[in-house]
Image (spheres, rainbow, N blue to C red):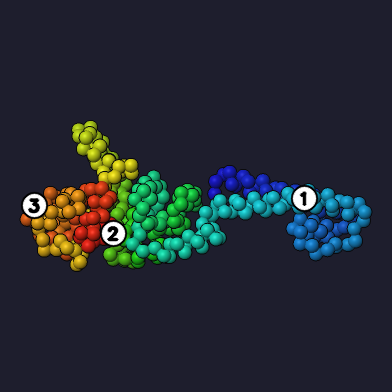
Amino acid sequence: MTSELTHRIVDHFARIMFLMVGGTIGYMLIEHWDWLDALFMTVTTLTTVGYGEVHPLSGFGRLYTIVFILTGVGLFLYIVSDMSEIFLEANPTALFGMRRMKKQIAQLEGHQIVCGYGRTGAEVCKHFKETQISFVVLEADSAAAKAAEKLGMLVLQGDASADETLREARIDKAAGIVCALPDDTANTFIALSARSLNPDITIVSRSANPGSEDKMKLAGAHMVISPFVICGRRMATAVTHPLVMEFLDVVMHSPGVDLRMQQVILQNSCQLIDTTLGSADIRRTSGAMVLALKQNGKLITNPPIEMVFKVGDILIALGTEEELRKLAKLAGAQQS
């Protein structure tokens, strides 16, 4: 909870105490009641419960009650309203919002799970939103969870390394999970839990320390990415080959340019099975360009035209959204 919200709560608590003490003293002085009767009358008046008078009121007592109702009750209702707003601000997925969000998450299939909404996680989510990929964010910090929800994201506030949280995010139906927490140990534990809960899920993990990569892969991560290593390589390439870097940025990160690089998995219904890359003539039929091919676990860049397609091959292609859609239809495959 932020210092501003804490300050508001303290101020409201002080106002409530002032109303309670002031009202009690007023009834004690005017009606000569004991403190318990005066306090009871004050509480029933402020909360508008309406149990009735403790003792018959005198004329001055009734005038005092009228003034107390007009001033005190109005202030008390304002405090209650603002306290409710504070509760909703501090709990972005509370009440009806939480129910609605959990209902939406319960319907997800083939989605991505992003663990951690820090600087890395926020960039991952931004890319998913731009490419219209369904995803859910797991974040323990309430302020970060609130920030993600304000941007229209599905958010579960909780520990991403806990099996219960991962199950709530429907990890059994998820296509992939991104471990974007700043702590390597936590990311390793998430990878281990994710692999046990969904053996087929694709796991990508962030690594801050060079020595963590092997441990994360042993835990089940398919790919481990170090922001520092990637940043260093990109800066070196930007200096030595700026045009290459500009091209990659256009292909991978420019939402205004209709040019994308995607992978397509060849399935049983694929028309390309048992044909060669040359005879398939993918460039002419779809417009997309095949840059690489993964076959039998081996990645082949610039594959030869004699390469024969098999079920389960993964094509890495470059083209516009329409061209890639044609390629997916031609291959009878799912774009991922």
Residue designated by label 1:
72
Please tell me which of labels 1 and 3 falls first in the chain.
Answer: 1
Q: Residues within 10 Å of mark 3 (few under 14, many from 20)?
A: few
Quick check: 282 left or right of 180? left
Residue type at numbered disc 2: Thr
> Alpha-carbon distance for marks 2 and 1?
59 Å
Q: Nearer the viewer, residue 5 or 154?
A: 154
> Alpha-carbon distance for marks 2 and 3?
28 Å
Q: Nearer the viewer, residue 28 or 324?
A: 324
Residue type at numbered disc 1: Gly
Residue type at numbered disc 3: Pro
Q: Residue at x 14, y 50 (%)?
A: 301
Residue 143 in view (yes/no): yes
Residue furthest to the top in view is 239
Residue designated by label 2:
202
The local secondary structure at tag 3 comes to loop
Whether the residues at callouts 1 and 3 have beta carbons within 8 Å, the answer is: no
The local secondary structure at tag 1 comes to helix
Whether the residues at callouts 2 and 3 have beta carbons within 8 Å, the answer is: no
Residue 217 in view (yes/no): no
> Alpha-carbon distance for marks 1 and 3?
84 Å
Residue 336 image position (x, y, % from top left): 28, 57
Residue 46 image position (x, y, % from top left): 76, 55
Q: Residue at x 76, y 62 (%)?
A: 49
The local secondary structure at tag 2 comes to strand
Please tell me which of labels 2 and 1 falls first in the chain.
Answer: 1
Q: How many marks?
A: 3
Q: Residues within 10 Å of mark 2 (few under 14, many from 20)?
A: some
Residue designated by label 3:
304
- Which circle, 2 or 3, is nearer the viewer? 3
